[in-house]
């Protein structure tokens, strides 16, 4: 890991006047973006945070947002920070400009000052561990080491002079170095004293260079001193650093970075490049330089922070030919760019040689199409001109008559050696080997318009691409047409590429691949359509590269194989864009081609901003997904720090969850997805957004999960999680809900009771009406009919006594009188039945026994009666109906079931009255049960009618050969006779 270093002097010094601008990806943040100013120290802790310190205090950066850090529950003892030093354990040591030190670990801050042994008001410039794990502090009053929580001044046995010290460092071999006013001192692992290095002068910084050598900067004499030789015995590099430097850094590649007052210098083996405010640097006075774990170089200025990192795509500097240019490769790794030949880029300046002198009309110097045929001849076409280069001979080629000023769209040579040329708005022509032109459009079935793209290969033949997704293929003298119906749904065809058996067509709407007898469309995993393709190259390894509107795409060979095996497969891909150094968009229509392979296996491409070059085989190693951190949670606009088990206030129905991923190189490429367990069924794709929102969230325990992808879009196995809970309001507590449920149950029970009582009262009223009516009928019968019959009998009897006894008529009259007495007796019995409510002590059980005995045949067994529960008096009408139903069931068992055993079960309970009549007879046929009884028999219907009159439920269960069971159920409030009283919910 790199280190920042601050030098003592900040004096002006000039950078080399001829230095080029640093050709690395550069991003800057100023105070307007929230970046701190005048940072003099930087460090990166093991969790990924970038820490920045200076006179304004302590800040940290996640790649997107700067935030001033305030430890929870504590405060930094001072704002002026002089040194930050990160430990592998995750601890961050902080030194202060005006004395004291702190260590921040797992959110806890421990401060040290003069009460702990540090010198009062003495700046702490360095904090580092030696090989034995002992922590040292470099101060202006000497070296101090920490022992059991107390700082001790270096004893004489350490052989360190008591003077001011600036920087501390532990190298790869575990040697501990200290640089002070009197020189540089080294403490070997296991040693008990320091050894002074020769040369040892210097007040600047120490460097552990990747080749294993140790260097120091002598700030007093403005020179670099090499303290040790490279570890492998290699020849050390020589650095020409002149003038005063404010900061320095050797990066992991062994290159040197120098911060100066006017800007930043980048020294490599062959050149020195600079970046200053006029080049986009955030400010002047580069006070600190730092390299993070991803290899990014960070520089602090007077006005902000800058980041430099390697680019995968490099711009080819072409001062003579800016803008979009047609491309063709040479044999040495260089390329023809427009009308210039650009040699293979090396360590020096780019060399561009013009193919022909410029003409006064500038537009005629613009090349729209470049093509190198199989014989190595270069053809270059522009506005109204065509040039041919064979070896060193470059000469113009006359176009067909009447085509002056035309634009050349594309070119291809066929198998016979003829050159096909598409002349915009003028048609398609073929230049024969004899130098004669033939017009081809509108002939032999070709469209009457010029193609926009062409390609030829001996194995694949000649292909022409037209607007509206049309392709024509010439093979063995025959043309075959393809269009949208055959899968060429790319709109305007702007590029055709042939590689082996593959035929690729790219255009404004996407990409298509020849498959079987037609074409299949190509789409990316996330719906990427690959629109605006003007350049296609398939490499030897099978990877496909596309120069498209949204950037430069790579589709791996394995994904192409999956697509061919399963058309419709959405391919995985890689995209390079401005984050990789590629600026601008692919050109539309012209020039062609916009992407070519070079002889050195690099790819060249042109965009709307210039020409670029890169090595497709040089891909960064896959990086693990960055650590994800859930930072805050709470109501929107009022989040609180997210700690495990945090409990949010009652009534928190909407949530804001802030999270981040500690990725410093390309945070724009990091994608997030999250879910709230119990709320989200699937992962929610958040894109680059670093905040999640939820509404209508109730109280309870929750688990929030979030994942961050790496730069290639790959997800980790495990998410970052936060367990939290939301406290319920008073109306959301379990006891309140229980009380509400109990109140609802009570209200329901009371309503049920009220309804039951109402039904009971209504039924009782109807029964009373029936009783009163029966009593009235009984009285009328007794007072009228029976009295009249009695009087009639007396009159007839009186008349009969006047006849002599032997008179036959008297005998007949006496027989009639006997029959009349029987009728009178039967009438009195009916009157008594009408007054059945006056039944005396006989209850339901006795009535059932009597009913059973009444219907029992002479040779049949008597029904067995079983009574459970405490017997209760029934309303007379209810009892009459119950007995009638039971009597009919018993009679049916005797008459139709041939039952050998009949059980009558009577169950009294407070809730209901239940009567069951069970026999072991032959049962009832299914068709009889379905019909509701036998034809011309009314027993079943009569039983059901009686049950309905008293609002009882009558159930019948029977199977052939398995007997029959009748069950009568009646609510207790309706069945039992009670004493009338008044209550709050009605009369009983």
Image (cartoon, rainbow, N blue to C red):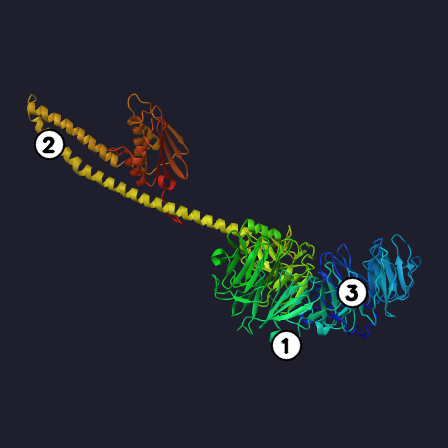
Horizontal side of residue 133 vs 409, given as left or right: right
Can residue 526 be seen from the camera position used here? no
Quadrant location, the N terminus: bottom right
| Residue 803 placement: quadrant | top left
- The reply to whether residue 785 is in sight is yes
Mark carried by residue 359: 1
Nearest to the observer: residue 17 or residue 951: 17
Q: Nearer the viewer, residue 873 or 838?
A: 873
Q: Earlier in the sequence, mark 2 or mark 3?
A: 3
Q: Secondary structure at mark 2?
A: helix
Q: Is residue 173 above or below residue 921?
A: below
Along the line of sight, the residue nearer the viewer: 981 or 121: 121
The residue beneath circle 2 is 795
Closer to the N terminus: mark 3 or mark 1?
3
- Give the residue number, with chain letter if any, for mark 3: 268
The mark nearer the N terminus, 2 or 1, is: 1
Q: CA distance from mark 3 to mark 1?
A: 40 Å
- Closer mark to the observer between disc 2 and disc 1: 1
Which picture quadrant has residue 409? bottom right
Q: How dense is the environment of label 2, judged by Cα within 10 Å: few (below 14), some, or many (20 and up)?
A: few
């Amino acid at each position: 890991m790199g280190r920042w270093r601050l030098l003592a002097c900040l004096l002006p010094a000039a950078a080399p006047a001829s230095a080029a601008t640093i050709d690395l990806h550069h991003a800057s943040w100023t105070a307007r973006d929230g970046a701190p100013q005048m940072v003099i120290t930087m460090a990166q802790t093991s969790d990924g945070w970038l820490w920045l310190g200076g006179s304004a205090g302590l800040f940290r950066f996640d790649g997107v947002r700067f935030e001033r850090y305030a430890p929870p529950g504590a405060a930094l003892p001072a704002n002026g920070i002089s040194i930050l030093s990160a430990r592998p354990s995750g601890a961050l040591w902080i030194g202060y400009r005006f004395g004291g030190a702190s260590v921040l670990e797992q959110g806890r801050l421990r401060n040290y000052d003069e009460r702990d042994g540090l010198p009062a008001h003495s700046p702490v410039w360095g904090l580092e561990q030696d090989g034995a794990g002992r922590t040292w502090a470099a101060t202006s009053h000497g070296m101090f080491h920490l022992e059991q929580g107390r700082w001790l001044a270096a004893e004489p046995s350490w052989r360190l002079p008591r003077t001011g010290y600036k920087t501390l460092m532990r190298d790869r071999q575990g040697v501990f170095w200290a640089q002070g006013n009197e020189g540089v001192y080294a403490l070997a692992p296991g040693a008990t004293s320091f050894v002074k290095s020769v040369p040892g002068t210097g007040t600047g910084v120490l460097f552990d260079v990747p080749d294993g050598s140790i260097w120091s900067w002598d700030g007093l004499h403005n020179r670099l001193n090499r303290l040790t030789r490279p570890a492998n015995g290699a020849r050390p590099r020589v650095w020409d650093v002149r003038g005063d430097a404010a900061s320095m850094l050797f990066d992991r590649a062994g290159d040197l970075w120098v911060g100066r007052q006017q800007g930043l210098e980048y020294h490599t083996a062959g050149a020195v490049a600079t970046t200053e405010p006029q080049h986009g640097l955030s400010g002047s006075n580069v006070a600190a330089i730092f390299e993070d774990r991803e290899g990014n170089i960070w520089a602090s200025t007077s006005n902000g922070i800058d980041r430099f990192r390697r680019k995968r795509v490099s711009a080819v500097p072409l001062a003579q030919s800016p803008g979009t240019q047609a491309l063709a490769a040479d044999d040495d790794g260089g390329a023809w760019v427009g009308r210039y030949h650009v040699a293979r880029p090396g360590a020096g300046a780019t060399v561009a040689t013009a193919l022909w002198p410029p003409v006064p009309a500038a537009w005629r110097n613009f090349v729209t199409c470049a093509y190198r045929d199989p014989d190595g001849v270069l053809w270059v076409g522009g506005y109204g001109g065509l040039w041919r280069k064979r070896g060193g001979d470059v000469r113009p080629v006359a176009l067909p008559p009447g085509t002056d000023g035309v634009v050349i769209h594309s070119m291809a040579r066929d198998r016979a050696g003829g050159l096909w040329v598409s002349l915009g708005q003028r048609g398609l022509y073929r230049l024969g080997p004899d130098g004669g032109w033939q017009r081809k459009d509108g002939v032999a079935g070709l469209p009457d318009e010029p193609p926009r793209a062409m390609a030829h290969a001996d194995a694949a033949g000649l292909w022409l691409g037209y607007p509206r997704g049309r392709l024509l293929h010439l093979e063995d003298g025959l043309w075959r047409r393809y269009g949208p119906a055959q899968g060429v749904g790319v709109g305007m065809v702007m590029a055709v590429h042939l590689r082996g058996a593959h035929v690729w067509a790219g255009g404004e709407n996407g990409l298509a691949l020849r498959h079987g007898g037609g074409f299949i469309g190509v789409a990316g995993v996330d719906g990427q359509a690959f629109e605006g393709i003007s350049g296609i190259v398939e490499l030897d390894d099978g990877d496909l590269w596309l120069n498209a509107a949204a950037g430069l795409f790579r589709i791996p060979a394995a994904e192409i194989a999956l697509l061919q095996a399963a058309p419709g497969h959405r391919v995985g891909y890689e995209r390079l864009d401005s984050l990789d150094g590629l600026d601008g968009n692919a050109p539309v229509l012209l020039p062609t081609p916009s992407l070519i392979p070079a002889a050195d296996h690099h790819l060249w491409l042109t965009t709307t901003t210039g020409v670029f070059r890169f090595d497709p085989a040089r891909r960064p190693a896959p990086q693990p997904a960055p650590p994800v951190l859930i930072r805050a949670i709470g109501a929107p606009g009022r989040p609180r720090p997210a700690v495990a088990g945090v409990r949010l206030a009652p009534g928190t129905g909407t949530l804001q969850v802030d999270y981040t991923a500690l990725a410093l190189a390309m945070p724009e490429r990091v994608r997030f997805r999250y879910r709230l367990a119990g709320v989200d069924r699937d992962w929610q794709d958040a894109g680059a957004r670093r905040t999640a929102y939820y509404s209508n969230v109730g109280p309870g325990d929750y688990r929030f999960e979030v994942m961050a992808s790496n730069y290639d879009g790959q997800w980790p196995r495990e998410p970052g999680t936060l367990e939290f809970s939301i406290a319920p309001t008073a109306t959301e507590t379990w006891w309140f809900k229980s009380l509400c449920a109990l109140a609802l149950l009570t209200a329901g029970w009371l309503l049920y009771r009220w309804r039951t009582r109402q039904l009971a009262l209504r039924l009782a009223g109807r029964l009373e009406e029936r009783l009163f009516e029966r009593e009235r009928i009984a009285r009328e019968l007794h007072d009228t009919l029976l009295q009249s019959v009695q009087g009639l009998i007396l009159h007839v009897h009186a008349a009969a006594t006047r006849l002599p006894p032997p008179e036959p008529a008297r005998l007949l009259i006496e027989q009639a009188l006997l029959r009349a007495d029987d009728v009178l007796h039967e009438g009195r019995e009916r009157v008594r039945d009408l007054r059945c409510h006056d039944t005396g002590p006989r209850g339901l059980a006795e009535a059932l026994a009597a009913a059973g005995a009444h219907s029992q045949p002479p040779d049949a067994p008597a029904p067995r009666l079983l009574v459970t529960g405490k017997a209760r008096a029934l309303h007379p009408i209810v009892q009459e109906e119950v007995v009638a139903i039971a009597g009919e069931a018993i009679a049916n068992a005797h008459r139709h079931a041939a039952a050998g055993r009949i059980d009558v079960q009577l169950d009294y309970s407070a809730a209901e009255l239940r009567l069951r009549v069970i026999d072991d007879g032959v049962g009832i046929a299914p068709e009889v049960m379905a019909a509701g009884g036998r034809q011309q028999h009314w027993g079943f219907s009569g039983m059901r009618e009686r049950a309905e009159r008293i609002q009882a439920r009558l159930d019948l269960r029977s199977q052939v050969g398995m007997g029959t069971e009748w069950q009568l159920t009646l609510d207790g409030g309706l069945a039992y006779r009670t004493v009338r009283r008044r209550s709050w919910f009605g009369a009983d």
